[in-house]
Image (cartoon, rainbow, N blue to C red):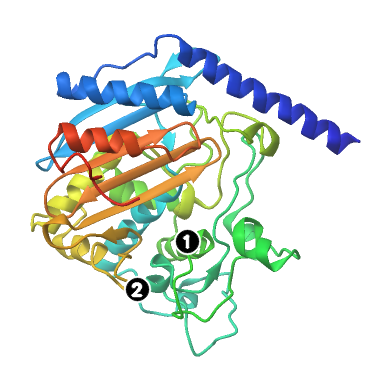
Amino acid sequence: MRNCLAIFLGTLVVLNSGCQVSQALKRSIPVSSAVGIEDERTQRIGQVIRDTMRKENIAGISVAVIDHGEIVWAQGFGYRDIAMRLPADTDTQFQAGSISKPVTALGVLVLKESGQLNLDKDVNGYFKDWHLDSRWPDKPVTLRLLLCHRAGMVPHGCLGYEESRELPSLLEVLNSRHDIADWLTDNYFGTIKAARPPGSGFDYSTGGYCVVQKAVEDVTGRPFEVVMDELLLQPLGMSRSHFIQPPPPMETNIAHGYCRWKGILYHGRWDVFTQKAGTGLWSTPQDLAKLIVAVQKARAGKRQGPISPAIAEEFLTPQFDAYMGMGVFLDGEGASRGFFHTGETLGYFASFGAGVNLGRAWVIMTNGKKDRFGPITKAIAQEFRWLSPDKEITKK
């Protein structure tokens, strides 16, 4: 009876949350001050964004655009908090979800370049108080395999924890065991393990990135979020980004997550993650655009802080599959080569698409768990004259 009541009350929360967003979007949607250009092109894109928000019931959207190798436009639309009527702006932080993975991969490549990590060494050689068990001792799990989702690891993803709950340690997460059906184990709630022979094929795995996180922490002797901040985020000027879980109490410009089942699955403004390397990044489109610009310029031969041309080249080079670089997805050929990734958690969805050679990219982050960016990316491509009107900027 108690469980039924909890589900019933959670359903009421879901319905009320949806109504709150819908009612707020019926009014004039707030728009923040633009960073960069503000002209008829961005006004038309902004109208497409507001139309998409109303159609898809998305509380807030923040966007950044790169053109000719520079961030040319960023702007926030809608609300970071519906109940408090707080608008989203270009400094509003959103959960990046799995976009954490390519950022983590770049951090690992920086550690590799400094000689602290070897991508092709058995990862068990890095651990101080844990061991990754495998039924295939002749096929070692390596950081390269883990970063490229080729280590045969499960689970695919993970659910976070309630905002008010004390987070388990990474070691506790790595040591947890789950006795449930195999199909469920291999999805979101399972034990972190090598379920298939390492190197045998592509198996997307957030669990594998927990192993990467453990290697980074044990080699450096410091928390993962500190290492990433010092090695990558701060040197690139990404001052609105961090892997801290939960977010620091003094941080107030954070988007409240909204989705259909949030009220049932967890309570609070957002969920929190021990699994920082795979899904723990908080960021803004403008900050992620800084990282993308750094990769693009380093790939063209000009070092950008911690990102050398060699790091950018390895990051964007197919490792085992034509569609997979070092923690980032690839598509296209020649001048149209691109790299991209998406990320989602309960209440959030984020995506970016970038060109390798042409200095173009878009980044979109929302506090609604909906992948509905097609009209927006098409409008960006049209207004900036990147592609013909019947094409999109990159695959998703």
Using residue 315 as the reference point, say whether residue 3 is left or right of it. Answer: right
The residue under label 2 is which amino acid type?
Leu
Q: Secondary structure at mark 1?
A: helix
Please tell me which residue is depicted at 54% across the width and 87% down the height of the picture: 137
Q: At which x and y percent is residue 98?
A: 44, 50
Q: Secondary structure at mark 2?
A: loop
Q: Which residue is mark 1?
A: 209
Using residue 36 as the reference point, say whether residue 97 is left or right of it. Answer: right
Q: Which residue is mark 2?
A: 119
Please tell me which residue is depicted at 59% across the width and 75% down the height of the picture: 195
Using residue 184 as the reference point, say whether residue 104 is left or right of it. Answer: left
Q: CA distance from mark 1 to mark 2?
A: 13 Å
Q: Residue 147 lies in what quarter of the image?
A: bottom left
Evaluate whether residue 78 shows in this view: yes
Please tell me which residue is depicted at 41% across the width and 73% down the height of the picture: 145
Q: At which x and y percent is residue 2?
A: 88, 35
Q: Which quarter of the rendered picture does the N terminus lie within? A: top right
Residue extending furthest bottom? 138
Residue extending furthest top? 27
Q: Which comes before the other along the chain, label 1 or label 2?
A: 2
Q: Which mark is residue 68?
A: none
Reply above or below: 211 against 142: above
